[in-house]
Image: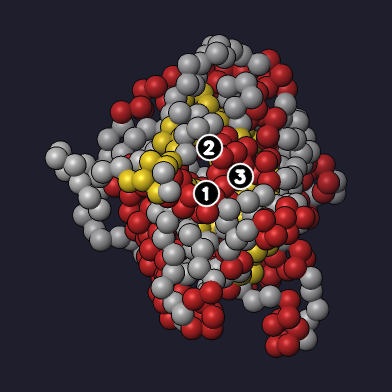
C-alpha cells in the first residue's frame, strides 16, 4: 500500500472513484462483525425460534442491562478440516462470550449458540470460555453460562474433550471465589452436564431445556427402559425429583429475569459483602400475628414460609430449591436492607423431619452462604431425622452429617430461632449454640429436648403407666409434666443454650440488632489444607 509523507495509507482511485483506505478497513471489520452476529444463518435461526427458543445473542441482550454487553473473541473460528469441517467455519465457533452489567453490576457471560453446529463445544469454544473464566476471576465478578448445546464436538475428537476438561478445572478453581450461575435453555447432555453441576446455581427453562448423562435411546438400549426427554431430564424432573436445578422459569424471558433477581442478592466475589439496599421497611416493625401462628397442638402443622415472610423485609424472600425437599426451606432475604441466607424446616411437609434430600439441600446452601459472606438465619422446627429402612440404607447418617459439617465450618454471623420442635440431633445440627452459632433465640412455643414428650414418656414411664388403672390419663399427665419440666425453652435458657426467649413479634427487630452487632465478626481456625466433608 502506498503511503503519504506522514506514513498514512494513501487514497486510491478505482474506475474514477476515490477509496478511503481507513473506511475500507472499518467496513471490512463491520462486515465480519455482521457475519458473526448471524450465527449459523437465517435458516438455522428460524429453526431455533420455531422451537420456542431465542438466539444466543438475543438471550445475552435480554439478560444484561441495555447497551452494556461487550463481546470478546467474536472473530475466532476452528482450525479443523476432517469430516468436512473446512466447509463449516463460522465466526465465533458456537459460543458468544463477553461482559456487561446487571442492574449496574459487572458480570461475565457466555452463551452457547445452537445455530452453529448445534452449539457443540469445540477447542475454540473451550479457549474462549476459559479465557472469560480467567478474566472473571481476576476481575472478581460473577460468571453466567447460558447453555444450549449438543455436547462435545465429535469431529474434533480429543480436542473437544480437553476443552471441557479445561472448563471443569476452572469451574472448580472459581468455586467459592466468584458466584457461578448456569442457565439451561436447551439440551445439555453427557459430559456437558458436569460444568453446570460444578456451579453454584442451576436455572432451567420449562419445556425447552433438559439435562442428562445418557439420553433416552441409550437408556433403552442398555436397560430396556423407555422414557422421553422431559421425563428423564426436563425442568420438572430436575427441580422436584433430582434436585439438580434450583430455579425453573416458565419461559426463557422469565428464566433470565430470575437470574437477574438472584444476582441482586449475591456479592461479586468472596472478598466483598453481599449488596445492601436502602431499607424501606421499618426495622422495628412487629407483626402480632406471629404470636399466634404456631398452633397450640404440637402435632398441627403451620406454614414456616409465612413466618419468614412476616419477619424479613417486605417482599424480599427469594426461595431457592422451592420444589425439592419441601420439608426444608432455603433462600435469600433482606433484613433492614442487608442480605441474609434463610434456612428452615417446613412443618407442612413430613412434619419438618430432616431426610436425605433435605440434608443435602440445607448443607449446600449453608456452605454457599459461608463462602460468600452472607449471614445465616435459621428457623428450627423439626421432630428429628426421618426414620425408616430407606433412609438408613440410603445413607442418612452420611447425609445428615453434612449439615453438622456445614454449620460447624461456617464463620459468617449465625443466628437461630427455635419456633417449636427442637428434638435431638435435629436440634443440634440446625445452627445451635452447641455447634457455635453466635446467638440462639427461642419462642415460648419451643420444645427443646432429646426427644418429644410422647416418646420420652413411653420410654421413661412405661411400667408406671401400665400399673395405673387409668393408663391413658396417667400418660397424659406425665406428658404434660415432662413438657413443663424438660421441654420448655426456659430450661435451655436457664443453662445458656438459648440466649433469649422472645415474644414472636419481637423477632424482626431482635434479628436486625443481632446481625448489626455481628457485621464485623472475625473468626480464626486451625491451619489446614481442607477438611474431609462427609460427601
Quadrant location of residue 437?
Answer: top left
Quadrant location of residue 411?
Answer: top left
Identify the residue at horizontal 71%, vertical 42% (top origin).
347
Nearer the observer: mark 2 or 1; the answer is 1
Helix, strand or loop at disc 3?
A: helix
Is 117 in front, or is 362?
A: 117
Separation of residues labelled 3 and 1 (CA atoms):
15 Å
Question: Where does residue 534 sit, x and y in percent of width and height?
Answer: 45, 65
Image marks 3 and 1: residues in contact by CB distance under 8 Å: no
Q: In this view, does 352 lie above or below 222?
A: above
Residue that badge 2 annotates = 64
Residue that badge 1 annotates = 34
Q: Counting residues from the N terminus, which is met first, the one under dot 3 or under dot 2? A: 3
Q: Residues within 10 Å of mark 3 (few under 14, many from 20)?
A: few
Question: Where does residue 362 sit, x and y in percent of width and height?
Answer: 55, 49
Helix, strand or loop at disc 2?
A: loop
Q: Counting residues from the N terminus, which is met first, the one under dot 3 or under dot 1? A: 1
The dot on residue 58 is 3
Question: Where does residue 452 sit, x and y in percent of width and height?
Answer: 66, 46
Separation of residues labelled 2 and 1 (CA atoms):
21 Å
Image marks 3 and 2: residues in contact by CB distance under 8 Å: no
**Residue 229 visible from this viewpoint:** yes
Separation of residues labelled 3 and 2 (CA atoms):
10 Å
The dot on residue 75 is none
Quadrant location of residue 356?
Answer: bottom right
Amino acid at each position: 500500500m502506498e503511503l503519504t509523507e506522514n506514513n498514512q495509507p494513501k487514497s486510491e482511485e478505482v474506475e474514477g472513484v476515490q477509496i478511503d483506505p481507513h473506511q475500507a478497513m472499518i467496513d471490512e471489520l463491520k462486515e465480519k462483525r455482521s457475519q458473526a452476529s448471524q450465527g449459523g444463518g437465517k435458516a438455522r435461526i428460524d429453526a431455533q425460534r420455531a422451537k420456542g427458543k431465542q438466539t444466543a445473542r438475543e438471550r445475552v441482550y435480554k439478560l444484561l442491562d441495555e447497551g452494556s454487553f461487550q463481546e470478546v473473541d467474536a472473530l475466532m473460528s476452528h482450525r479443523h478440516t476432517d469430516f468436512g469441517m473446512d466447509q463449516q467455519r463460522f465466526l465465533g465457533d458456537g459460543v458468544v462470550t463477553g461482559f456487561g452489567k446487571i442492574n449496574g453490576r459487572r458480570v461475565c457471560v457466555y452463551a452457547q449458540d445452537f445455530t452453529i453446529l448445534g452449539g457443540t463445544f469445540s477447542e475454540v469454544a473451550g479457549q474462549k470460555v476459559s479465557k472469560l473464566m480467567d478474566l472473571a476471576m481476576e476481575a472478581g465478578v460473577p460468571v453466567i453460562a447460558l447453555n444450549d448445546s449438543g455436547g462435545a464436538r465429535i469431529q474434533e475428537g480429543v480436542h473437544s474433550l480437553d476443552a471441557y476438561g479445561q472448563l471443569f478445572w476452572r469451574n472448580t478453581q472459581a468455586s467459592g471465589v466468584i458466584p457461578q450461575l448456569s442457565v439451561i435453555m436447551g439440551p445439555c447432555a453427557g459430559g456437558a452436564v458436569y460444568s453446570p453441576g460444578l456451579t453454584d446455581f442451576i436455572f432451567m427453562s420449562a419445556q425447552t431445556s433438559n439435562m442428562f448423562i445418557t439420553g433416552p435411546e441409550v437408556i433403552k438400549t442398555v436397560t430396556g427402559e423407555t422414557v422421553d426427554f422431559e421425563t428423564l431430564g426436563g425442568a420438572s424432573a430436575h427441580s422436584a425429583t433430582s434436585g439438580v436445578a434450583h430455579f425453573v422459569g416458565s419461559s426463557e424471558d422469565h428464566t433470565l429475569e430470575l437470574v437477574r433477581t438472584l444476582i441482586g442478592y449475591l456479592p461479586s466475589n468472596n472478598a466483598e459483602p453481599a449488596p445492601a439496599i436502602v431499607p424501606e421497611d421499618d426495622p422495628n416493625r412487629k407483626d402480632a400475628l406471629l404470636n399466634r401462628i404456631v398452633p397450640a397442638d404440637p402435632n398441627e402443622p403451620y406454614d414456616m414460609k409465612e413466618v419468614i415472610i412476616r419477619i424479613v423485609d417486605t417482599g424480599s424472600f427469594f426461595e431457592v430449591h422451592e420444589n425439592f425437599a419441601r420439608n426444608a426451606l432455603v433462600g435469600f432475604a433482606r433484613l433492614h436492607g442487608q442480605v441474609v441466607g434463610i434456612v428452615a424446616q417446613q412443618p407442612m411437609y413430613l412434619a419438618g423431619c430432616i431426610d436425605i434430600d433435605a440434608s443435602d439441600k440445607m448443607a449446600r446452601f449453608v456452605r454457599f452462604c459461608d463462602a460468600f459472606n452472607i449471614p445465616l438465619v435459621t428457623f428450627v422446627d423439626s421432630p428429628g431425622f426421618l426414620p425408616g429402612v430407606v433412609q438408613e440404607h440410603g445413607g442418612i447418617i452420611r447425609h445428615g452429617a453434612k449439615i453438622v459439617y456445614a454449620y460447624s465450618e461456617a464463620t459468617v454471623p449465625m443466628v437461630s430461632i427455635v419456633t417449636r420442635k427442637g428434638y435431638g440431633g435435629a436440634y443440634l445440627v440446625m445452627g445451635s449454640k452447641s455447634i457455635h452459632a453466635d446467638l440462639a433465640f427461642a419462642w415460648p412455643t419451643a420444645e427443646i429436648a432429646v426427644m418429644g414428650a410422647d416418646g420420652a414418656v413411653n420410654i421413661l414411664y412405661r411400667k408406671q403407666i401400665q400399673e395405673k388403672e387409668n393408663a391413658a390419663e396417667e400418660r397424659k399427665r406425665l406428658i404434660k409434666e415432662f413438657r413443663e419440666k424438660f421441654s420448655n425453652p426456659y430450661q435451655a435458657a436457664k443453662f445458656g443454650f438459648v440466649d433469649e426467649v422472645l415474644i414472636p413479634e419481637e423477632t424482626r427487630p431482635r434479628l436486625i440488632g443481632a446481625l448489626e452487632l455481628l457485621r464485623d465478626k472475625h473468626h480464626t481456625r486451625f491451619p489446614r489444607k481442607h477438611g474431609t466433608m462427609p460427601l
